Image (spheres, rainbow, N blue to C red):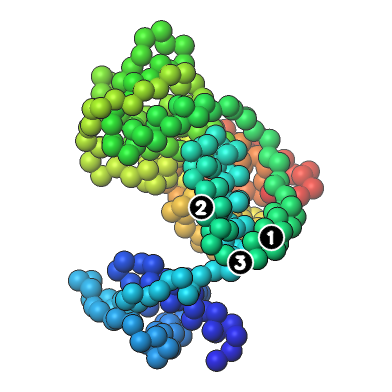
Amino acid sequence: MSFSKAQDLIRLAQIAAARRGGVSLEDICEEFGVSHRTAQRMTDALEETFGNVEAADGEDRKRRWRLINPGLSQLQLRHETAVEALDIAARTAESEGRLRHAKALNDLRDGLLARVPARARIEADAEAVLMAMGQVTRPGPKVSLQPTILDAIIEALRGPFRLRVRYNQDAASRILEPHGVLLGHRTYLAARDPTKKDEVRNFRIDLIHEAETLNESFALQEGFTIAEYAAQAFGVWQDPAQYGEVVWRFAPEAADRAAGFRFHPQQVLEPQTDGSLIVRFHAAGWLEMAWHLYQWGDKVEVMAPQALRDMVEGHRRSDFAAMP
């Protein structure tokens, strides 16, 4: 067995041990980027190498493999990699004002280092990598989020519990029913106001001045998921009146570049015979779309909706020296 295949086998054993329901052939194909036949060979190697592999068919008729009593302490990532990952995650959480999560990640990092030999070398190796990793500066609003506000929101989401807040310039407080948090150039609380329409709306967290978690549970909106809610908008602006199919056509010289973009989680890419590329998805937020489309100059054409086409048509420049 080659060294790279041995690494893949160890990684597969980790996944089979960590997932409660085990790992299927489809999971292996997606995780390792291999064919169905290669995935079958990997499960054969897993069964031949480890004596505690269990294979069982689920209700969906898919076979899954898992390790019983795997002894994960013998199947660990390189400690340098784990320390780097925890450091990066902690720095991201701290930059977003999630101090509770940052502290928890740093505690995990310190606990990991306390259990391994050669701590000084591992810390030095990880620090060298982190120092070499820069962050691209992107223009945008930088708002200050109060840790106490975020803590109250997190506690409310765990319940879920209602949240009493004082929002924006309101003198009186209001009661919200939190459904999730949207992280982006601004951070929003997706919540329902039970005194108004039975719909989830966005509330800017930087405009929440007071927040208190109440000992009052509530039922989440039926069928709601934060992923599907976020996908209704191109950016963060939610407007049911604008929601619909969006169709963009990228010129042949921009097609390869556009194909590397993830404009929307449910986008569909349609290469054309003339070398152009059509991108389709369903979302709202025409203004945020227009902001993005401007960067492409005349290399993109809005085919639908007509209202968005009208917004950008007079602003498609041909003199940009580069594409996004």
Q: CA distance from mark 2 to mark 3?
A: 16 Å
The residue located at (28%, 31%) in the rendering is: 161
Is any part of residue 180 visible from this angle?
A: yes
**Cβ atoms under marks 2 and 3 closer than 8 Å:** no
Tag 1's secondary structure? helix
The residue located at (31%, 66%) in the rendering is: 20
For the residue marked with disc 3, what is the amino acid?
Pro
Give the residue furthest to the top. 171
Of badges 2 and 3, the one in the foreground is: 3
Name the residue that disc number 1 marks: 120
Tag 2's secondary structure? helix
Of badges 2 and 1, the one in the foreground is: 1
Q: Residue 174: which quarter of the image?
A: top left
Q: What count of labels does the image hold?
A: 3
For the residue marked with disc 1, what is the amino acid?
Ala
The image shows residue 33, relative to residue 296, as above or below, that is below
Q: Earlier in the sequence, mark 2 or mark 3?
A: 2
**Residue nearer the viewer, 75 or 130:** 75
10 Å neighbourhood of mark 2: few (<14), some, or many (≥20)? some
Tag 3's secondary structure? loop
Q: CA distance from mark 2 to mark 1?
A: 17 Å
**Residue nearer the viewer, 101 or 22:** 101
Looking at the picture, how far across and down is residue 261, in whole percent?
59, 54
For the residue marked with disc 2, what is the amino acid?
Leu
Q: CA distance from mark 3 to mark 1?
A: 9 Å
Is any part of residue 176 visible from this angle?
A: no
**Cβ atoms under marks 3 and 1 closer than 8 Å:** no
Name the residue that disc number 2 marks: 108
Q: Which mark is residue 117?
A: 3
Q: Earlier in the sequence, mark 2 or mark 1?
A: 2
The residue located at (37%, 46%) in the rendering is: 228
